[in-house]
Image (cartoon, rainbow, N blue to C red):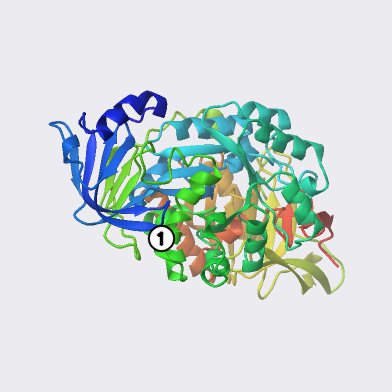
């Protein structure tokens, strides 16, 4: 059991001095030291009270009758992996389900921002996520969401987060800092609420998460950095990554289910030779299928290595760099005395197969098999009753009326494997007084689901390649999490929307008015408390149904989930209309 360092200190000294037995000894491994970037053969790790007591060529003196001995047999001993920025809700799981999914992949520390559930349930949703995070067998640190809504005036959320609530949460156990500050125009313009939230976080001695989703590296960027953000994960190019590092921000390079940004920035290290201490690896958004079948932070580290990064540098960027960024380098992130005993055993640093995972001094996974329980809280009924449409949705609710034979419209252009969209235009026909989508262009609608207003915003989107009479509906719609419906057929769109209302939220695919696949997400319309493999199977069925409807995009579901994210350029949809994120204003659908 993990003890606070001040409580564990006397015993750690006794074990390190060879005067007392350890709880666990990992014997005969190759010590990957992330402080010096070395691999040191023939070392043992002695563990007591959930912490590393010592690392020596021979710790046999610490083996007593009750000491658990794990034979490393020459395998590499590396620190448990840390995810510096992510959203548990994107995995469609509760914190317990997420922990159970990632532990076998070697993740032992997570820094998560529950701003998805905050937009639906407010501060109570944050507390519920924090509560379940605190009881997991690995370290889950919660960031207090900063922006709900993400862009005031451009969207309406289920609940709003105030600066007073941010200041209150900074005193909670388990709160590591402020979640990504998405309202970058507000910070740059000196918005009092945004600056107050950052100031409250800094006053508490905690870390301010950043989110600067603009290519402008001039005065607006300078003002944003001056506002206090400590990192940024919205970088997609080498130039942007270098700009963050030069300003003293942690450049968080992400590889999620659909965000492939590492390869475009890792060249700052592999080719430009920049100091890697300012660069950090993260996932941001990974759905359950990716977690179960492909991995978590081990996948990100492997990818960085495949992109030409030195394996030891890649491991640093997923361990000590992350811990240092959050001021926890004396607590975790390395295999050194006093730190939490988070250890991975692997036979190969290049491909990183995870064979043993020790977290806080406990063997938690072996050869892909979870060995511990990940306890859940009792999620209240109020968290499960969140989809309120104000009555059944009808096909005609998705009609855009117009005069004439054709009309020019704005179109949201999806970009594969990236979060930004493109602001496109299309000439569409008008039939029976309604604009009809055709070719690459589909209908898109946002259905208000928090206050039962019955409101529907209509628009058009391209890039999915859908064919036939189909629709995809989702109550996962970052960040306001209204219901997003995309389709080629208004009847199928209505059927899909009404189905989600009946089951309390999720993602569903309909074709010719019939259900093809659904993943039910009854908690806040965002997550499920079922085991990760079950959720992953349903999510995979949804992905396959999307493919069967003509879409060839990688992880198209993730693209669906961001169509309402009004803080990433260029064009989005909200309950208030079509949003030009470059100008941060509502614009007309027709031109």
Q: Is residue 112 above or below residue 42?
A: above
**Secondary structure under badge 1?**
helix
Picture quadrant of residue 45: top left
Between 279 and 428, the one nearer to me in the picture: 279
Between 231 and 517, the one nearer to me in the picture: 231
Query: Residue 340, position in %: x, y?
Result: 38, 38
| Mark 1 residue crowding within 10 angstroms, few (<14) / some (14–19) / many (20+) | many
- Residue 36 appears in the figure: yes
Residue, far left: 65
Q: Is residue 444 above or below residue 408?
A: above
Query: Residue 530, position in %: x, y?
Result: 40, 42
Q: Residue at x 45, y 60 (%)?
A: 313
Between 91 and 80, the one nearer to me in the picture: 80
- Residue 372 appears in the figure: no
Q: Is residue 67 above or below residue 392?
A: above
Query: Residue 510, position in %: x, y?
Result: 54, 59
Q: How many marks?
A: 1
Task: Pick the quarter of the image with the C terminus.
Answer: bottom right
- Kindly identify which residue carries mark 1: 312
Query: Residue 364, position in %: x, y?
Result: 30, 42
Q: Is residue 130 left or right of residue 371?
A: right
């Amino acid at each position: 059991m993990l003890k606070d360092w001040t409580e564990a200190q006397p015993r750690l000294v006794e074990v390190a001095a060879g005067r007392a037995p350890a709880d666990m000894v990992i014997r005969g491994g190759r010590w990957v030291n992330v402080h010096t970037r070395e691999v040191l053969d023939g070392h043992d790790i002695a563990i007591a009270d959930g912490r590393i007591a010592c690392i020596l060529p021979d710790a046999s003196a610490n083996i007593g009758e009750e000491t658990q001995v794990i034979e490393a047999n020459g395998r590499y001993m590396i620190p448990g992996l840390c995810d510096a920025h992510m959203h548990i809700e994107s995995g469609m799981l509760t914190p317990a389900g997420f922990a159970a999914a990632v532990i076998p992949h070697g993740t032992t520390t997570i820094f998560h921002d529950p701003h998805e559930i905050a937009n639906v349930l407010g501060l109570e949703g944050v507390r519920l996520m924090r509560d379940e995070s605190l009881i997991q067998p690995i370290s889950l640190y919660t960031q207090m969401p900063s922006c709900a809504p993400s862009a005031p005036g451009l969207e309406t959320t289920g609940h709003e987060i105030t600066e007073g609530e941010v200041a209150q949460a900074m005193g909670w156990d388990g709160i590591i800092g402020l979640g990504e500050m998405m309202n970058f125009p507000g910070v740059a313009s000196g918005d009092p609420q945004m600056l107050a939230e950052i100031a409250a976080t800094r006053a508490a001695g905690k870390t301010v998460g950043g989110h600067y989703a603009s290519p402008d590296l001039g005065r607006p960027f300078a003002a944003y950095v001056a506002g206090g953000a400590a990192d940024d994960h919205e970088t997609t190019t080498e130039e942007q990554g270098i700009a963050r590092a030069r300003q003293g921000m942690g450049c968080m390079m992400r590889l999620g289910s659909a965000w492939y940004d590492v390869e475009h920035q890792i060249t700052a290290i592999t080719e430009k030779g920049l100091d890697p201490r300012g660069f950090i690896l993260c996932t941001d958004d990974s759905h359950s299928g990716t977690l179960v079948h492909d991995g978590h932070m081990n996948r990100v580290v492997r990818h960085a290595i495949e992109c030409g990064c030195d394996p030891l540098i890649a491991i640093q960027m997923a361990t000590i760099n992350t811990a240092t960024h959050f001021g926890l380098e004396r607590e975790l992130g390395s295999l050194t005395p006093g730190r939490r005993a988070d250890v991975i055993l692997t036979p190969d640093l290049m491909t990183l197969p995870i064979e043993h995972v020790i977290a806080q001094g406990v063997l938690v996974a072996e050869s892909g098999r979870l060995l511990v329980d990940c306890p859940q809280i009792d999620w209240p009924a109020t968290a499960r009753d969140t989809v309120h449409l104000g009555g059944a949705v009808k096909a005609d609710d998705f009609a855009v009326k117009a005069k004439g034979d054709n009309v020019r419209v704005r179109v949201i252009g999806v970009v594969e494997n990236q979060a930004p969209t493109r602001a496109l235009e299309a000439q569409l026909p008008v039939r029976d007084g309604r604009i009809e989508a055709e070719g690459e262009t589909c209908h898109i609608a946002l259905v208000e689901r928090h206050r039962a207003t019955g409101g529907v915003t209509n628009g058009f989107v391209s890039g999915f390649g859908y064919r036939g009479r189909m629709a995809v509906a989702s109550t996962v719609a970052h960040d306001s999490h209204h219901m997003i419906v995309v389709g080629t057929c208004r009847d199928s769109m209505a059927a899909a929307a009404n189905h989600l209302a009946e089951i309390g939220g999720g993602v569903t695919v309909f074709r010719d008015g019939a259900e093809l696949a659904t993943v039910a997400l009854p908690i806040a319309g965002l997550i499920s408390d079922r085991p990760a493999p079950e959720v992953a199977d349903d999510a995979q069925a949804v992905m396959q149904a999307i493919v069967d409807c003509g879409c060839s995009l990688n992880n198209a579901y993730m693209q669906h989930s961001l169509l309402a994210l009004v803080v990433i350029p260029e064009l989005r949809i909200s309950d208030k209309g079509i949003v030009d994120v470059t100008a941060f204003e509502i614009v007309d659908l027709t031109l």
